[in-house]
Amino acid sequence: MARRPLPRILSTGSAQIARSRELARTAADSATDILHPLITVARGLRRLAAAGRLKWAETPKDRRGPLLFLAASVVLVVALVPYGPLLAVITLMAAAAWQGRDRTPPVPEGPDESQAQRLRSLYEALVPYFSTAEDPAPLYAHGGDWEKAFPEYEFDGSGRVAHLAVHYPAYFPDGEAEPRARVEHLLAAKSGRGREYLFDWDEEGNTLTLRVLAPLPTDIAAQRFVTAPGETVLGFTDPSHVLRTLPLAHGEERRDVPPVVWRTGVRSTEPHLLAVGRPGSGTSTLLRSLALQALQYGDVLIVEGGGTGEYACLAGRDGVLGVEVGLAGALAGLEWAAQETERRLIAANQARQEGNPPPDDVKRPLWIVLDRPTAFTHLAEAEGREDPQTFLQVPLRHGRAASVTVVVAEQFDNLDALSEAVRQHTRARVVLGPASGRQLEAILGAPAHTTPVDDVPPGRGYARLGAGPVHRLQVPATPDPYDDATSDAHRQAVLDLLPPRSTPADAEAPPVPAEPVALESS
């Protein structure tokens, strides 16, 4: 009977022990708070000393004497200056405190209830794609742990996924395009439509990284870009995809932006370009931008099949051989271009045989810009005349050796009417405006690593130069300055780039003669 009070005694002792531990922990925390500045300064002094020893070890032996003399001189000057030692000690302590600060990154907090629900729904949606019945320990299973599948995640201000790392099992066929496309489409739909996502597949680590891309800037106007002869700026892209930047000189904000540079000329591997888009997607803007850049070093012949007068601002300008909007002018202009290409080839070959450099008129670049040439194809067929595209075979096949560049812009609906020579020799490709993944892959020759969206500004699309990677692209704003809907700033930017007018627009003579003899003599 005397042993009954024992549980009370034990419980009282346990409470006293817990209280003692709590007091000890509180005292330790208080001591740590008091000693934290001293610990920080001591850590900083240790790091400064280590850096000094490393610097001394890296200094050559023949330079250690002058370095010691310089250090002694500094110490002597500080000692002689009033309050010099005190200021030196304060400076040293401040530097030590800065070097000794805690650099451990903060531990990210877990997701809240809504974010966890979004990640859980993403996990459940991926179960049919990343699981199989034969897996004894599946990473993905209905009701499973999503934290093992998503080791990294970030959310934006609206609560949608901005960054996500997805682990997937090794048996998933990540080397095949169709399974990858299905997973990318699912993640883009579940993470939020209307945004562009970049998918990075790490086949070795079985990890898929999803990132939301920021919109490309649309405020870049036409201007003189800092490029070398033979380099043309198609537009601008993401800074992580190119290693070069160009300074902007137009506008109030001066900054460097990453460009997509297309190289033309004798050493170019992609001397000709094809741009495809829907009406209003910005293909004419791209061609105007290329023409203005080409006029800085060469001559330009423009053939417009749309008949909307998009290039009237270039008529009669220096370097502009002609702006043809009719079938007769297009036939005459392209026939002259074919003969001019042959003449350049003959002159260059003759100069090489004689051991001389090519003539200046052969080295001067010639650009043939065609906007919707298939319109002339249908018109020529109706009138029983020759298709103007037949005259493009010689410039396309031999234009690189003759410094002749062909740029063609066409709409999706009329791609089948393009000639085989145009489709085969235009290895630099641009797609502007809304386009599906299959359309992008069919034109560019490779799938885009980002998800295309339906609502994009004019001049927004993708570009691929030959066998290179697919880049996001935003064409610089180069509108028709005669259009009433153009802003004053963009209108003035284009007008500043126009060459001086050599022939009045209303009295312009045909720039391309019809006689072959006159063409060659010109």
Image (cartoon, rainbow, N blue to C red):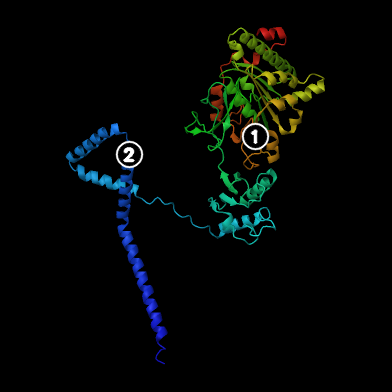
- Name the residue carrying label 1: 432
Q: Find residue 171 and report its horizontal and vertical position in percent.
A: 66, 51
Within-10-Å neighbours for mark 2: few <14, some 14–19, many 20+: few
Find residue 230 and report its image quarter: top right
Residue 324 shows in the view: no
Image quarter where the C terminus lies is top right
Circles 1 and 2: CB atoms closer than 8 Å? no
Residue at image location 66% in from the left, 7% down from the top: 521
Q: Nearer the N terminus, badge 1 or badge 2?
A: 2
- Name the residue carrying label 2: 57
Q: Find residue 263 and report its horizontal and vertical position in percent.
A: 59, 25
Image quarter where the N terminus lies is bottom left
Q: Nearer the viewer, residue 440 or 17?
A: 17
Find residue 70 and report its image quarter: top left
Q: Nearer the viewer, residue 281 or 354?
A: 354
Q: Nearer the viewer, residue 108 or 353?
A: 353
Residue type, numbered disc 2 = Ala
Mark 1 lies on a secondary structure that is strand
> Disc 1 to disc 2, how far (Cα)?
58 Å
Within-10-Å neighbours for mark 1: few <14, some 14–19, many 20+: many
Residue type, numbered disc 1 = Leu
- Give the label on residue 207, or none: none
